[in-house]
Structures are given as structure tokens and as C-alpha cells.
Image: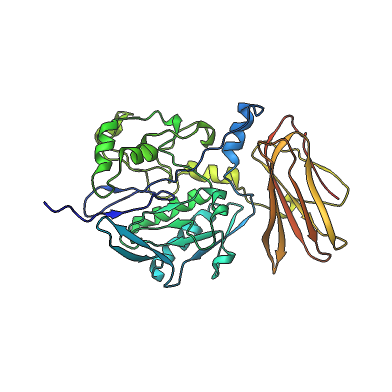
Amino acid sequence: MKKPNKRITRKGTGDVKTVSDNKTGKHSYCSMPKTVERVFGPDVNPNRAGLIRKIEKKWANGTVLHYYFFDKSSDGEYVYYTNGTRKWVGWTTQEAEKKIVRRAFDIWKKVGIGLEFKEVKSREDAEIRIGFMRGDGAWSYIGRDINGIAEDERTMNFGWDLTRQASEIDTAIHEIGHTLGFPHEHQNPNAGIVWDEESVYSDLAKPPNEWSRETTYHNIIKKIDPDTVQGSNWDPNSIMHYPFDSGMIKIPEKYYTSGLEPDPGLSKRDKTWVKSFYPPLKKNDYIDLLPFRSVQMSIKAGEQINFNIKPVATRYYNISTFGTSDTLMVLFENENGENRYRTADDDSGTGYNAKIRTKLIKGRSYVLRVRLYYSNRSGGTAVMMW
């Protein structure tokens, strides 16, 4: 009997908001990235490490995230098959699919968050680079992890036609949720889910997914680190939750017979949590940072303080935090009315303070954003420029 010529798919670099396949009635899933988990030294206490893990993927609030759709015929890659043949698969798509993704960005923005989203025509100007490689699943890197991806590579992909049914808008909303730094909700250790594991393995081994046990464990069965969970409760209606067929979840029992299908769109809790990390910013949320004048950060873990900087002389400046704390510090420069990223430092889990040394130009305007991961005492951190 002739063996089928199977496609050799490279391991996915992200994951999906699963959607129902109209032909099979099954859910199409895709693999989450297998990243190296961060290890802290013995001097970092568990509480401090937990706070860092919960926040480290999140962006500095107020960031403008630029997104780009791959648009060249040379954008793509070869897919290899077991018989030694290969096929070129592109990353581009038609305008109709792009409109769905744009609408998904608008849905997140209309929640009332402090982040901004802007489409750009150059991949060099984009943090988020979106491809439409068929058969590669729908996936996204998590939060600030996308900063480490080369500018000619995708940070997000949609592997099937988003125009095939109206509910595909949730696929795009879900992937953007990952880009904002949110993990999967069905792997929340607080959910109390008890899987019928063999049923899960068996179901995911069949088309359309055809996963190995290892892949299924990584994407379904495995619980994520409790420190990365948003809050203490499970939200089965979260946009970050997969749907599951009956017979896969043993506990809670009601899902064993009926399956679990999250409500469409963002849940109430999704909206609450995204605004907790990215609250809307107002003009009076900014403090002027002047040379040789320290400003105390009287904020809680996870919160952020924002500074306006208007240098009176063109020269190199040092900007640093002081105190026993973990912070993310990001500097932006106002360019044609938009704050563009210039440089950053993240001292979380280390023994030093965040510090930026850079040249500031007289007559130009800058914004410094400092998010606090952890402080050994309230108000024990200050920021200074000299």
C-alpha cells in the first residue's frame, strides 16, 4: 500500500484562537511556541519572581504598536513533503482578510485602553508583522517577545481564510490578545479543569490537527505558570479560551456532555484585565522630568509612571531608577505628533537599576514610561535624569 505524501510542518511559532471547521464540525487548533522558561537566581524570592512573570510580557502603556501586512511575492517559504518535494507558500493575502484584522485591532482599542495601533507600509517600522501562510495555523508571539523577531519574519500568522465565516473575527481578536501579552485561558491552573486526557489525545491526533501527544500536552493539558495568570478566577468565556467538544472535559461535569463554547467576542473580564494593564492615559498623567531632580515612584506593582522630557541643551543624558526594585523603562521621542520608540532597559530579576544613556536634542520632546514590577517597600523607588 502506497504511503501518503504528508506535509512536514515546522513547529508553530505561536498558537490560535480555535474556530469551528464548517466541513468537519471539529475545531482547528495550532501549536503554541515552545519558548525557554525564564529561570531566576536563588537570591530572587518567589514573590518577586511571580510579579515579574505576570508583567514582563506586557508593553509600556501608551506605546503605539505598528502593524504591517506582508505584501511582496517574495514573502513566504517552502513547505517540504516526505517524498522530497517542496512547494512555495506565500504570506500575502487579499484586502478582505486585512479588513477583518484591522477591525479586530479596533475592537481592542474601543475597550478604552492606553495602547494605540497604527498600520504602516514598511516592515522596518512595524513591531507586529502579519502573514497569511495557509496551513501554518493562526498564531502570535506573546507580548514583548515580538521585539526579538527579525524584521523579515512574521510575528503573527493566519493559516486559513478569515472570510469563510463571520466568527473568524474572533480568531483575529484572539491573536492580537496574545500580542498584548495575554496567555491561554484554558491552561489557567485556577480553572480546575480535569481532562479526559486520552479523549483529548485521540481527538487531536485526528484531522484537521493531527497532533502528536507531546504537542497536545503542550497546548491543551499542560497548566501554565500560576504567576502568569490574570487574577484568581477562570473565565470560560474569555477570548483567550479554546472551545472544546463534549467528552474532553471531565470536570466541571457540565462540559463533559455539552462541550464548552466560549461566547463570541471579548468577555467582561477580558475588558477589565486589559484595562488594568493598559488604562487610558490623560494629559495630567504625565510629570515633567527635570535634570538633577529625583521623582519618587509612589505606585504599586504592575502600575506605570509617565514623564515628559524637554531638554534645554543638546547632550548625552543619563536616566536611571534608584532603590531596590524591578522596572521596565522605555524612552520615546515625539516624531510628527507620534511617540516613537528610541531605547529601553529592563532590570527585572537583576541586582542593578534600569538605566538609559542617550543623546537628547534641544527643542525636541520625549516621553519616558516606567512600569514597576516589584519594590521592596512602597515608594522606595525614584527616577532621576542628569
Residue extending farthest left: 1
Q: Is residue 214 above or below residue 86?
A: above
Q: Is residue 384 above or below residue 83?
A: above
Near-viewer residue (9 or 65)? 9
Residue at x 28% of width, y 36% of height:
200
Coloring applied to the structure: rainbow
Q: Position of residue 33 (x, y in %)?
A: 44, 46
Question: Based on the displayed image, in which of its 4 quarters is residue 196 positioned?
Answer: top left
Near-viewer residue (2 or 213)? 2
Near-viewer residue (54 or 43)? 43
Question: Based on the displayed image, in which of its 4 quarters is residue 187 positioned?
Answer: top left
Q: Position of residue 141 (x, y in %)?
A: 49, 50
Near-viewer residue (62 or 213)? 213
Whether residue 105 can be seen here = yes
- Indicate left or right for 197 with 345 as reference: left
- Indicate left or right for 7 with 240 as reference: left
- Indicate left or right for 256 with 382 as reference: left
Residue extending farthest bottom: 73
- Indicate left or right for 311 with 113 as reference: right
Question: Based on the displayed image, in which of its 4 quarters is residue 204 positioned?
Answer: top left
Q: Position of residue 224 (x, y in %)?
A: 46, 35
Residue at x 67% of width, y 61% of height:
340
Q: Position of residue 152 (x, y in %)?
A: 51, 63
Whether residue 134 can be seen here = no
Residue at x 75% of width, y 59% of height:
366
Count all numbered tags in the image, as a single digit.
Answer: 0
